[in-house]
Image (cartoon, helix red, strand yellow):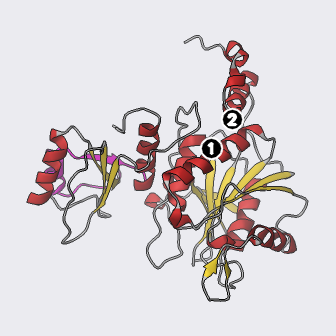
């Protein structure tokens, strides 16, 4: 295809700034943008990392949370010789994230990351919906964008047990030392191993746990006790950039149905607006295929709604029971994190494309 950029730039003034910026990058054939350690953009959105304990004992998000983190980071030497440019599109607890607020955040990041000449970016976020934001940003920005690292905390930063300072410090260190582009997450679990995750590989955190894991344990890399970074020999799948030519407006509610394998539950009726169903399987790639599921799958097939089984691995042997859901036209999504699969489909339907991933 003869794709000429220059004529496009003649009318690019009518496009959003971040679209024009992307076109100019293509026109100039710019090399991947690595962090040089001079200018760092920090985007605050709230979450536990911005919390403080109020007089009534509840956690709240005060106006001073942004400056508390920046001053604390400077006192700890995390931001030495780095110019920080903060922004705050909104402030909320991440469990309150909706399609509307997530769209607002993604568009804020896209416009700034392509338009403003910063060397790297950190996004401070709550942990509850961190995997959703990371996946949507991963697909919205792709792998060649200036490096962006998401950071959360298991406790308020004033709590000595908080891992937020460590997560933030290693996010900065990763940006300074590793020539990487794309979207990542910095997090240190209770094993005290600072870990860098690929944005689209995150799993939902388990209830009652502050630990964060990647699907198939396929992290991007880890730091050892000497502070040396070890990149995973097998690089996890990275997010291809989806074709977003306009500001993202995620449909709310998403025309997708999320289900999780469990014992003794009942399957819901399928609402009229649903375009795809995502069924998170057990760790072994299996689900219960009793009469109720067979009836459920038959209804979906009759309406030509794909039923995707998420959490499947291509590097393991299948159990005999897998034959049963294969016969019901249930389609396994191999080697993609369940939340990433859902978010990719959500973006697709929101920009007028099919919800189908296969």
Q: Residue at the bottom extreme?
A: 56
Who's the residue at 22% across and 60% down the image? 287
In the picture of the structure, the residue carrying the numbered disc 1 is 107
Count residues near mark 1 (Cα–Cα under 10 Å), then give few for <14, some for 14-19, many for 20+. Answer: many
**Label 2–label 1 contact, CB within 8 A:** yes
Residue 256 counted in the magenta span: no
Q: Secondary structure at mark 1?
A: helix
Q: Secondary structure at mark 2?
A: helix
Q: Is residue 11 visible?
A: yes
Residue 19, given in percent of the width and then of the height, sits at 66, 31
Which quarter of the picture shows residue 23? top right
In the drawing, does residue 55 fall left or right of residue 315? right
Q: Quadrant of the N terminus?
A: top right
Q: Considering only vertical position in the picture, is 14 above or below 52?
A: above
Count residues near mark 2 (Cα–Cα under 10 Å), then give few for <14, some for 14-19, many for 20+. Answer: many
In the drawing, does residue 120 fall left or right of residue 248? right
> Magenta segment, which residues?
315-337
Residue 40, given in percent of the width and then of the height, sits at 80, 53
**What's the CA distance linking mark 2 and mark 1?**
9 Å
Who's the residue at 65% across and 38% down the image? 144
Which quarter of the picture shows residue 289? bottom left
Q: Residue at the front extreme?
A: 56
Q: Residue at the right extreme?
A: 81
In the picture of the structure, the residue carrying the numbered disc 2 is 18
For the residue pair 26 and 44, the one nearer the viewer reads as 44
Q: Considering only vertical position in the picture, is 230 above or below 117?
A: below
Q: Sequence-wise, which precedes: disc 2 or disc 1?
A: 2
For the residue pair 242 and 287, the one nearer the viewer reads as 242
Who's the residue at 69% across and 12% down the image? 7
């Amino acid at each position: 295809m003869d794709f000429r950029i220059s004529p496009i730039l003649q009318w690019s003034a009518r496009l959003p700034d971040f679209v024009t910026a992307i076109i100019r990058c293509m026109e100039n054939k710019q090399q991947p943008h690595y962090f040089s350690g001079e200018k760092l953009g920090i985007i605050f959105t709230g979450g536990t990392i911005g919390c403080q304990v109020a007089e009534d004992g509840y956690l709240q998000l005060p106006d001073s949370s942004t400056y508390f983190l920046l001053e604390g980071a400077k006192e700890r030497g995390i931001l030495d010789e780095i110019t920080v440019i903060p922004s705050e599109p909104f402030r909320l607890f991440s469990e309150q994230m909706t399609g509307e607020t997530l769209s607002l955040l993604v568009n804020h990041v896209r416009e700034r990351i392509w338009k403003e000449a910063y060397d790297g970016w950190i996004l401070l976020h709550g942990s509850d919906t961190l995997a959703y934001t990371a996946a949507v940003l991963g697909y919205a920005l792709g792998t060649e964008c200036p490096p962006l690292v998401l950071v959360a905390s298991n406790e308020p930063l004033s709590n000595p047990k908080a891992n937020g300072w460590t997560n933030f410090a290693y996010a900065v260190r990763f940006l300074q030392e590793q020539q990487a582009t794309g979207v990542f997450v910095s997090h240190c679990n209770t094993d005290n191993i600072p870990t860098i995750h690929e944005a689209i590989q995150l799993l939902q955190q388990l209830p009652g746990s502050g630990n964060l894991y990647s699907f198939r344990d396929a992290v991007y890399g880890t730091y050892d006790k000497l502070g040396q970074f070890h990149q995973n020999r097998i690089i996890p799948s990275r997010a291809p950039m989806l074709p977003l030519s306009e500001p993202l407006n995620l449909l709310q509610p998403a025309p997708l149905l999320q289900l999780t394998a469990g014992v003794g539950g009942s399957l819901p009726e399928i609402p009229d607006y649903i375009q795809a169903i995502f069924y998170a399987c057990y760790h072994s790639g299996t689900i219960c295929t009793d009469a109720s599921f067979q009836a459920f799958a038959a209804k979906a097939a009759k309406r030509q709604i794909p039923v995707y089984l998420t959490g499947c691995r291509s590097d393991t042997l299948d159990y005999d029971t897998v034959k049963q859901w294969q016969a019901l036209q249930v389609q396994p999504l191999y080697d993609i994190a369940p939340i990433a699969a859902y978010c990719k489909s959500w973006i697709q339907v929101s920009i007028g494309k099919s919800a189908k991933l296969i």
